[in-house]
Amino acid sequence: MAPYLALCREDAQQRDYPLREVFNAMRYVAKTGCHWRMLPNDLPPWTVVYQQMRRWIDARCFETMVEDLRILLREFAGRKGQPTAMIMDSRTLQSTPESGSRGAYDGAKRRKGSKVHAAVDTLGHLLALHVTAADEQDRAQVGILAEAVQQITGDNVELAYVDQGYTGENAAQAAEKQGVQLEVVKHTEVKRGFVLLPRRWVVERSFAWAARFRRLARDYERLAETLAALHYLAFAILMLANLARQLAQS
C-alpha cells in the first residue's frame, strides 16, 4: 500500500514515524473504535496519526485503494475489471454528540442519526458512497451515486438493483440520465420477518462487513467526509485481506 499512502518520500526529513505504523494506528482506530487520545503507546502519537489521516482523506487515498483492489479481486474471481451492474442501498447510523447538526430522524428506522448511501458491485465490493442526514430520502441520492459510479467505472454500469425505497419517476429519471436502469427487487408475496432477496442481499452483506468495525457502529465523526473516508478505509482493509487469501491460493 506504500504507493497509495506515501504522499512524500519515505526518507523525508519531516517524517519521524514509519508510515506503516501510522497506517496501523488508523486501522486500530477503525477496528476498535477507540478515542484518538487512547491510542496504545506502541503506536505513534494520536496527533501524528490524525494529521496524516487528514492528508490521506484530502488526497482521496482510500478511495483509490478501494478502486484498484476491486479491479484486482474481480479479475481473480474471473470477472471483468469494471462491473456492468450494481446494487444500491443505505444504512442509518445512530448519532452522537460529535455528529452534531448532521443528525436527523429516520422515520422508517425510528432512529436519529446519519445515513450512509452506498453502491456495490455484484460481489459486494464498494463502488461509491455518500453521507447525508438520516431524514434524506434514498431515491433523492440515486443521481449522485449513479454519477459517481459512472465516473469510477468509465460509464460501464448499465443496471442497478434497488429496493422499494427507490421507486418513483424522479429516481428512474436520475439513473437514466447517467445511463443506468433501475430494477426494483420486490417480495413476491407478503411475508413477515427477514427474507433473502435475489441480488439485494449482497449490499446488506457489505453493510454487515462494515458494521464489524466499531468506529462505524455509530456516527462518531464531526465531518461527513471523515465518516465516508472511514468506510472506504474499512473496505480497503477487508479487500486487502481477501486479496492476500487469493494470492496465497494462487
Image (cartoon, helix red, strand yellow):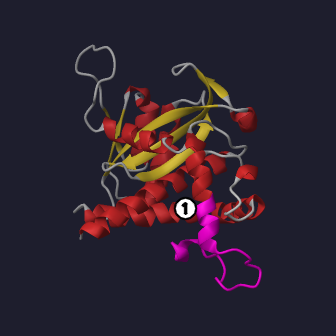
Which residue occupies 34% across, 17% down? Answer: 193
The reply to whether residue 59 is visible in this rendering is no
Counting every numbered tag in the picture gives: 1
- Vertical comparison of 34 with 115: above or below: below
Dot 1: few (<14), some (14–19), or many (≥20) neighbours within 10 Å? Answer: many
Asked if 113 appears above or below 51 in the picture, the reply is: above
Q: Which residue is drawn at 24% across and 71% down?
A: 250
Q: Is residue 80 above or below residue 5?
A: above
Q: State the residue at coordinates (39%, 52%).
A: 125
Residue appearing at x 45%, y 60% in the figure: 152
Can I make out residue 51 in this image?
yes
Q: Using residue 112 as the reference point, say whether residue 181 is left or right of it.
A: left
Q: Does the magenta stretch include residue 14?
A: yes
Q: Which of 127 and 22 is in front in this view?
A: 22
Residue 52 position in % (x across, y down)? 70, 65
100 inside magenta stretch: no
Q: In which quarter of the image is residue 137?
A: top right
Q: Where is residue 161 in the image (x, y as percent from the top left)?
A: 33, 39
* Residue bearing the label numbered 1: 62
Query: For the residue marked with disc 1, what is the amino acid?
Result: Phe
Looking at the image, which is closer to me, 113 or 170? 113
The boundaries of the magenta stretch are: 1-25
Q: Where is residue 158 in the image (x, y as percent from the top left)?
A: 32, 50
Locate residue 163, reporting x and y percent: 37, 30
For label 1, the SS is helix
Left-right relation of 246 to 144: left
